[in-house]
Amino acid sequence: MSIVGTKVIRKEDPNLLTGRGQYVDDIQLTGMTHMAFVRSTEAHALIKGIDVSAALECEGVIGAWTAADLELPPLPEVPGLERPTLATDKVRFVGEAVAVIVAESKYAAADGTELVVVDYEPLEAVTNIEEATAEDAPLLFEELGSNTVAEVPSADDHQSVFDSAPHTEKIKLINNRCTAAPIETSACLADYGPAGLTIWASFQAPHHLRNRISAWLGIPQDQCRVITPDVGGGFGQKINFTPEFFLAPVLSKILNRPVKYSQTRSEAMTSMYHGRAQEQEVDIAFDNEGKIQALRVFASQDMGGYAIGTGMGMPVLTTAMSAGCYVIPNVSVAWRNVLTNTTPIAAYRGAGRPEATYLIERAMDHIAYKLEMDPTEVRRQNYIPKDDFPYATHSELAVYDSGNFEGALDELLEIMDYESIREEQVANQDMPEKPLIGVGFSSWLELAGFGPPGSLEGFGHLGSWESVQIRIQPDGSAIIYTGASPHGQGTVTTFAQIASEYLGIEYDKISVRHGDTATIPQGIGTMGSRQVAVGGEGVKNASIGIVQKAKSIAAHKLEANPEDIEVKDGSLFVKGSPSKSLSWAEVATFSFQRLELPEDMDPGSLDETILQEVPNFSFPSGAYACVIEIDKHTGDTRVRDIYLVDDCGTVINPLLAEGQVHGGVAQGIAQALYEEFSYDENGQPTTATFIDYLMPGAPDLPSYTSGRINTPNPNNSLGAKGIGESGSVGTPPAVINAVVDALRHLGVTHIDMPATPQKIWKILQGGTK
Amino acid sequence: MSYPTSININGNRYDKSIDPRTLLVHFIREECGLTGTHIGCDTSNCGACTVLLDGNAVKSCTVLAVQANNHEITTVEGLANDDGSFTPVQEGFRQEHGLQCGYCTPGMLMAATALLDEIPNPSEQEIRENLEGNLCRCTGYEMIVRSVQWAAQNPDGIPVQIGESS
Ligand code: FES
Ligand code: FES
């Protein structure tokens, strides 16, 4: 039986289930100190002075520093738009680091921060795109002359198509600001000793951090080691640079002691990068059959207080994927990035593609409303046919590899009883005690498997490949070292499955090591649903390379031709004569012994390193349907059922794939119904704790009903597309389409995310919107 | 000011002299070095810090260590049997993929252990409601629910063989 495609329980779990995991804050070093930040309480203000003297008197406080004391370069980000490591003359969002304290204990460090006095001269704050782009808007960076830091107009607005189209529609959408909120906040521990610097960091890309920090500090990379031990979730939030990773090494060097930082949740809510926060103006033109003729998108991306690389890239990805899984003859896209006095924006699970899916899937339902068509029918009218791949779009980033969008919808309608839901919907409308029912669809398509050469370089990474090294041990077991840096995805398990399949070595004799720049070949990291499609492909290719050489060794010993050697169940044997065989352990031992090897082979050659490249992104897709129930009296809204058909190409481990989908869907439902990071008019956050930011718990979420289709990815030999972000891409429009569907009989055509009970209650009171 | 505090954790007695404001979770993690119990918030919402105090699930970030003076605590490190074998709850989480990053997991395991102690055969709704105080950002909860159901159905924790499909 093939182990690829099989439900295998995880190698990761035994440690994590017994308290033997090791997250950054779990590590204790001799002489360790604790770092804490003084953070801005103002959204926009000049810093007139900072007095740390009282903090220095505080018991247990070792030192306190401001930007002026340390004279540090800014964080290594977009040239010309860099963010200071500690605020210098000005603060630009609530939560920005202003000063730093180091103390003997966490409690003393926290005490110290309370005693620092910062003299602010408040400035008018801009908290949203409209304010930030107003004519006389206060500027975050006076020297830039504008809060708009990038703007790309469309090449052709296709106005003539709109002028002659039978129907046109204008839609305004807001993709609400969310925070990824992994349950482990940001954390790091720096130990800068005579032999060099070691940083333990809760991060998704250890080599990326190592390379940038060593350059920033001006030390050689060999003397800078980054370890990402167990990491408690990331979701894109932990691929970005924040001040702690840079300050901890600096202060460790000054103090000649290890410096640890473990962030509080309250800090994490305002200082870890947020996601989404994109506004869209969408125009569509369509005919009487519901065929879309033109799509025009203008995306305004809120950057927050500082523009960083991943944040700048969000509208690029959104506008590349705006056409979704549909044939749209005329597409025009434009975008801009705008600074506001809010927490800076970066990637959050899906990163730009949930925003694209939301706009095109809302547009599909608008066509359905206008023409009074069934939403599934409108989609069928517009799907790219399953034989039209590869499919070139308006964007050169997006050349779709494969898919079967109508097939996914067919499968979806197989696993749900659409008709009876519709009957219930109509019946319930007139029964006061029964909830309103709505059903919403999303035919989604995303861009994943980052990526082809140049793609991640655009976000500041060294390359877009992933590293894999496989070393066969003398006893025939195997260790895989990879630059992938998983934090929940189960990569140790899936990579061992792939290696077992192609090496012919038992799953239990394969280990996977990651997250240490001192022992792992230069790697890239875990993001953009790339693990299996890029790294996994590398595991397969490295395994094949090793088996080739193992066959030569076996052939030499068995006096046969390498082409006649087969590998199965832990042994290598001559085709047709299984008695002429060697165990993997024997071949492995010979591989280290000069006298046992063929002349053209060196000892230790069962060791293969690959920097796996891929020629294109991958394009996971699927069809989701959400059934919503709304309490007519209270507006209480819940997802009753959600049906999920995914196409991620080849599945390595169905259990883990399902887990990835569930997690993403949960975050998608959360964005649609519960979560929004908001500010008052002065830029003060109003949802900065888990009390106000409504991350759903177990009773708030439904069970998930899954189906699957498989169109293999033609661009890697595994056929895998990636699955990490699918749920968060596909879900929000399914949920909102369902909410609007439940309220359609009241004349409702749109409701912004999150569709809170308050918003819905108001609609129910007012009758229509 | 420091305060003598004696807490029995997982059958071992820890005598420490502590700052009276020390939270139980910090006592467990920093004073005793039992880092399996995690911290995920500062508002008592996430449940990552859940431990058993005299057999009842509590959020150890909301208890002062001195309040636990002379009481018995069980943390995730104290769950597995002496021979290293898993409890049904631990095994359930492994079999049903009830964890991804593992950060919420110790708290979930303790909350689920307390739940099954009280209600040996909970309904799905009872499981969801009893775990309301434990946030997980990775799993979307369904597999956590299945994990608890597995534990309820397998009080002896029979392991399924690796590679077996179901
Ligand atoms: S750390 Fe105790 S509830 Fe979050
Ligand atoms: S497994 Fe990551 S938070 Fe629950």
Image (spheres, coloured by chain):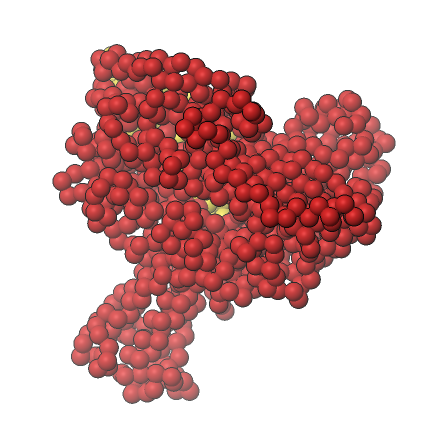
Chain colours: A red, B yellow
Residue A645 x, y percent position in the rendering: 64, 53
Please identify the residue farthest to the left as the structure is shown.
Answer: A194
Is A15 in front, or is A245?
A: A245
> Residue A766, how many percent across, how many down?
78, 22
Residue A524 screen position, x and y as percent: 37, 52
Left or right of B78 in this view: A219: left
Residue A47, above or below A701: above
If the image is split into quadrants, where does the C terminus of chain A sit? top right
Residue A42 visible to the viewer = no
- Residue at horizontal 27%, vertical 40%? A216
Residue at x-position 23% and y-position 45%: A224
Q: Tell whether B18 sits left or right of A369.
A: left
**Residue A228, located in which quarter of the rendered image?**
top left
Q: Residue at x 54, y 19 (%)?
A: A680
Q: Taking A350 as reference, is A473 above or below it?
A: below
A493 or A294, nearer to the observer: A294
The image shows residue A629 at horizontal and vertical percentages of 72, 35
**Image position of A582 (left or right of A252):** right
Q: Nearer the viewer, residue B159 or B50?
A: B50
Determine the residue positioned at 60% across, 35% down: A279
Is residue A156 shown to the viewer in this render? yes
